[in-house]
Image (cartoon, helix red, strand yellow):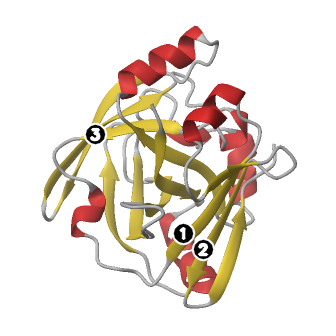
Amino acid sequence: MSLALDHLVVAARTLDEGVAWCEATLGIVPGPGGKHPLMGTHNRLFAIGSPVFPKAYFEIIAIDPDAPPPGRARWFDLDTPAVQRALSHEPQLIHWVARCDDVAECIGRWRAAGIDRGELLAAERDTPDGTLRWRISVRADGARLCGGALPTLIAWGDRHPTDTMPGSGVTLEALCVAGVPAAVAVEGAAPGISFDADRPPLTATLSTPRGRVTLSSLSE
């Protein structure tokens, strides 16, 4: 069972700050996104897919100030003081999300190996093209694990976000992951993805209108 990169996650203190960072850093205005009632967050998205990373996209996410408290920890450690302190400086690459053939089986196998990736939750958000639905692994404490290097697992319903995304002018060239258990590295081994213990948890290399841009994640 192999993992495929689904999307990169950049978190921002506010979505407006995330959009401004994207324009300044990558040279594009991100496309529309939506709201996540389950988690009290909202996002903006754009495609970064290529033959090496089919159906890959880029998510800029922030806590939605207009949403009621979700009654649980938000995903991707967004509630933690450490992440919020980092975001007070600028938006940060914090995580990656991976598709796999059987999410429930992968979660169970990781749990047996001592890796608690969390429960499989059903989530959805409305879009102009209809409701997107997916299942995603989220821990009760919202933790990413391994400084964000251990991927969250996802399985989409009948539609994928990239099905209606235009090209953005940004493509993902490579992703380097550091600090995950060996079993995860074996499953995640795929073209374009490498594993190196001497790097930050995540290092993404993108081709953009501003040239080649390398994003490194927080080292916690």
Q: Residue furthest top?
A: 112
Give the image location of residue 39, x and y in percent: 40, 39
Residue at image location 20% in from the left, 41% down from the top: 157
Q: Which residue is mark 2?
A: 206
Q: Which residue is mark 3?
A: 134
Q: Can residue 2 be spotted in the picture?
A: yes
Q: Earlier in the sequence, mark 2 or mark 3?
A: 3
Whether tag 2 and tag 1 are in contact, CB under 8 A, the answer is yes
Residue at image location 61% in from the left, 39% down from the top: 77
Q: Secondary structure at mark 2?
A: strand
Could you tell me how many numbered marks the image carries? 3
| Mark 1 and mark 3: Cα distance apart in space | 23 Å
Q: Residue furthest left?
A: 130
Q: Earlier in the sequence, mark 1 or mark 3?
A: 3
Give the image location of residue 205, x and y in percent: 65, 69
Q: Between residues 170 and 194, which one lies in front from this camera angle?
A: 194
Which image quadrant for residue 135? top left
Instruction: Sort mark 3 into few (<14), some (14-19) or many (20+) by Cα contacts within 10 Å.
Output: some
From the viewer's perspective, is the residue at label 2 or at label 3 nearer?
2
Q: Earlier in the sequence, mark 2 or mark 1?
A: 1
Is the residue 66 above or below the residue 17 in the image? above
Q: Which residue is mark 1?
A: 172
Is the residue 199 above or below the residue 212 in the image? above
Inspect the image, locate mark 3, and give the three-letter code of the amino acid beneath it: Trp
Inspect the image, locate mark 2, and give the three-letter code of the amino acid beneath it: Leu
Q: Between residues 111 and 68, which one lies in front from this camera angle?
A: 111
